[in-house]
Amino acid sequence: MTIPALLALACDAPEAAKEPIDDSSDEHTRAVAISRAAAVSAPSVDSNPEGYEIDEDDFPPRSLSAASHSKSKDDDDDDDKDKDKDKDKDKDEDEDKDKDPEPEPEPRPEPRPEPVPDPEQGPKPGSEPKPEPEPKPGPEPEPGPKPDPGGEKGEVLVALAGDMGSGSKPTAVYKLILAEKADFLIIPGDFDYKHNPKTFKQEIDDVLGAEYPVFLAIGNHDTKKWKEYQADFKARVEKVPGAVCTGDLGVESACTYRGIHFVLSGIGTKGSKGAQEQYLADALAADSSPWSLCVWHKNQTDFQAGDKPSDIGWTAFQHCQKDGSIVVMAHEHSYARTKTLTAIGSGDHGATGLPELLEVGPGSTFSVVTGLGGKSIRAWEEGVHKDDTWWGSLYTSDYWRKNGVEMKKPSADTGALFIRFNVGGDPSAAEGYFKTVDGDMIDEFDIVRK
Ligand SMILES: [Fe+2]
């Protein structure tokens, strides 16, 4: 189903919300201590085929003692039950799809429709009609830049953060996104962890405003109330001038906004993997935007800093690499960004080039896990990753490596990845940075589109 772009104008962000308090003190110290203990006996991937969730709610982790193991296991069991329920729910929802009299989204993307012209792009009232601007390499004309308060004409700043939680921590991240003047936010799954779409929406609205563009991909903690999250997402995106989304939003969907194309996929979380892979391939092939992102929640063990299992398989990544689409994920609660990758799924994934200079285009891309939206922070599982050669930067509860250089870890645990496209008006230049809520620059890199 095509979601038409609607014409309402965004978006006066209201005053920042008062900070609610819901987090225990000294969480970081606790997390570090526990993660170090966990690292000693970190389970291998093979010993953890089910992929335990080790959220802060689950502390202490399974490796600390028999008692805590038992507690953790119980939590995991609950999680598994939840997963089973989620599966049932998914089944129900799939069945609902068949019965739903409302036309459901097309399973295959159509070529990107012409975006509705952004009314802010036209000549300003009262301004002199100008001849064609100077012939420097301009930004992508469709859907075209609107006045950009944060940078040069044509620049687009995208914020990316997942695994949010609720309360003061995600609120601080939303405030950071507001302060950075990001043009829009994409959340690659796991919203409030409380199955509470109202709270999740309210906390965003309180800081960024009800009409601020926020795009979602489903996470494993979002399945129980997905229909409500998705309805709110749909209502929000319909109010964003120039935003064009097609498909089953956040599950099997593709959007274009401000000249950036992004696929929002539920692969590994909802829907059949084969269908999701095919959707990705088709959606990426059908779009010709210069910048493209593949966004989903879960990941592969190789492409995150912890010991989460490989839930996606390599095919989806390979579709994105073929298209030169940047892969953005969450699920593991830390930050992990690769070098340029040219052979994803091979031994070293074809990692090449400088850690701080990434090249995207047909056959090359990079991947990022941005899972520090507020829920918790997890450790670097060195034993799992000791042979990894593809990292650009990593940031976990106990380890920070920035562009290949080990750093002394700062205090803040939460933050967001930002990517500024069309830097200086150059449609083949972008730059990325991960910034904490305290203002520390955890990662900084340039991107060249070939
Ligand atoms: Fe998750």
Image: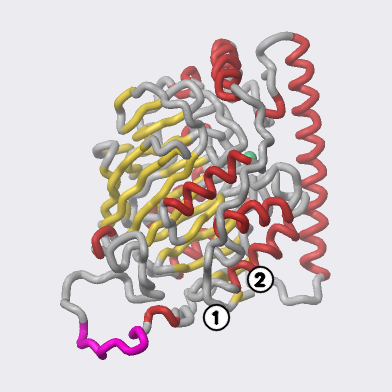
Position of residue 174 measured from the top left corner of the image (x, y, whole percent): 54, 49
In screen coordinates, is 186 left or right of 156?
A: right
Left or right of residue 39: residue 199: right
Nearest the viewer among 114 and 229 is: 229
Q: Tell me the amino acid under the disc marked 2.
A: Pro
Where is residue 346, by image quadrant? top left
Taking 380 as reference, is 197 left or right?
A: right
Q: Quadrant of the N terminus?
A: bottom right
Q: Of the residues tagged 2 and 1, which is closer to the observer?
A: 1
Residue at point 77%, 47% (across, down): 87
Would residue 281 be visible to someone looking at this image? Answer: yes
**Mark sitting on residue 105:** 2
Q: Which residue is mark 1?
A: 7
* Highlighted range, magenta: 123-132
Residue at position x 43%, y 57% from top?
182
Residue at 51% from the left image edge and 60% from the top image edge: 263
The amino acid marked with disc number 1 is Leu
State yes or no: residue 129 in magenta. yes
Task: Locate residue 139: give its quadrant.
Answer: bottom left
Measure how far apart labels 2 and 1 are at the Cα level.
Answer: 22 Å
Q: Name the residue rendered at 74%, 59% in the picture.
A: 228
